[in-house]
Image: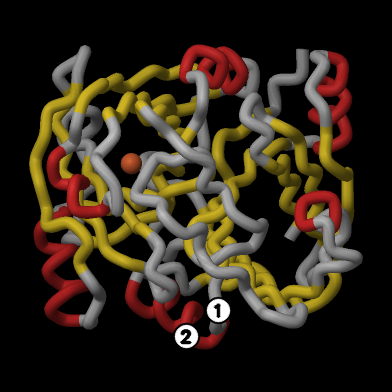
Amino acid sequence: MFSGFRGVDHVGIGVADMGAALEFFGQRLGFSDVLFDHTGDLPGIEELTHRRRTRARVAMLASQCPTPLGPGRIKLVQTLEEGGTPAAPPGTGWGEIGICEVCLHARDVPQVHKQLVDGLGCTSLMEPVSATVMPFEIGVELSYVADSDGGKVELIEWTGLWKALPGEPRLEGVNHVAFGVADMAATREFYGQLGFTHFVFETDGYFEPMRPWYPREMPRQHMVLVLPGQGAGIEPVQLHPTLDGRGTWGHAGPMEFAIGVSNLDAACAELRSAGIAFHSGPHTVDVGTGEWRYAYFHDPDGLAVSLVEARF
Ligand SMILES: [Fe+2]
């Protein structure tokens, strides 16, 4: 059994203006370490977009303060085809099928949130709240700000799970990605095969601070958080009722995620032998600082999720 799955490596975020996004994520959110900044055709994306080709500018960013609870990266994607970066799917609130947030770990959420909103001009989408999540009674502090294209960025501190590393209030790397699913049990079983095995919490109800986000009657929200042994985690959400909010690949805001692997060819062979279908790949792109290798597979909802082997 291939065991080189390393959790969520990065979350892909569509941006309309790469310059503005690099300033936002680099200067305000601390993702200032540019691992590559590549412009060119993206092989295999035509299987996702049904366009003949997809030319894009892609910047892979690492946090200047990655920690075990905030290890993940961010990949900004600006589509350069006619029409540019597609708009975010209309009519979505949070948790519809598709990607709905990127979550960064932080030390001292209230202080970091205040700094972002009052000091750096970020838009607050949810003021800091404290909660205790079941069944392990884990304390958590969280808030939300908008990214440069209006996408949802959660700030979280797992105060009851693991004490943050010492230091000043700060933002760290990606803690988890949230995405809507149609069948929670099928999703958990599927991602369990990919190393997402540390169950952290499960809630089923209405998280009231999110109520204003829905342009329709608020659906019931069933959410689960699962962390892997290394890398960032996943937060699948099943809404009752739900709708399809995945939109066009590359759309503005959080739009995909990638699972890190130590050996892409071995990982693909393992998943294929388990009956998992691939959209495309493996592909290798020369990004100047090295090779970016990826392949896209179908998850139980047909979401295009990638495996990534970072040789840069
Ligand atoms: Fe979250």
- Other-residue count near label 2 (Cα within 10 Å), few / some / many at <14 / 14–19 / ≥20: few
Q: Position of residue 262 (x, y in %)?
A: 73, 36
- Image coordinates for residue 172, horizontal then vertical, percent: 35, 56
User: Taking the image as drawn, is residue 245 in sight?
Assistant: yes
How far is the residue under mark 2 from the one under mark 1? 9 Å
Mark 2, residue position: 20
Relative to 77, residue 118 above or below: below
In the picture, the disc for residue 16 is 1
The C terminus lies in quadrant: bottom right
Task: Report which quarter residue 248 is drawn in.
Answer: bottom right
Q: Secondary structure at mark 1?
A: loop
Q: Residue furthest bottom?
A: 19
Identify the residue at image location x=12%, y=78%.
118
17 or 10: nearer the viewer: 17
In what quadrant of the picture does the N terminus appear? Answer: top right
Disc 1 crowd rating (10 Å Cα; few below 14, some 14-19, many 20+) is: many
- Residue 302 in the figure: left or right of residue 177: right
For the point 62% across and 30% down, the residue is 301
Residue 215 pos. (x, y %)? 29, 53
Q: Quadrant of ligand 1?
A: top left
- Colour pattern: secondary structure
Q: Amino acid at mark 2?
A: Ala
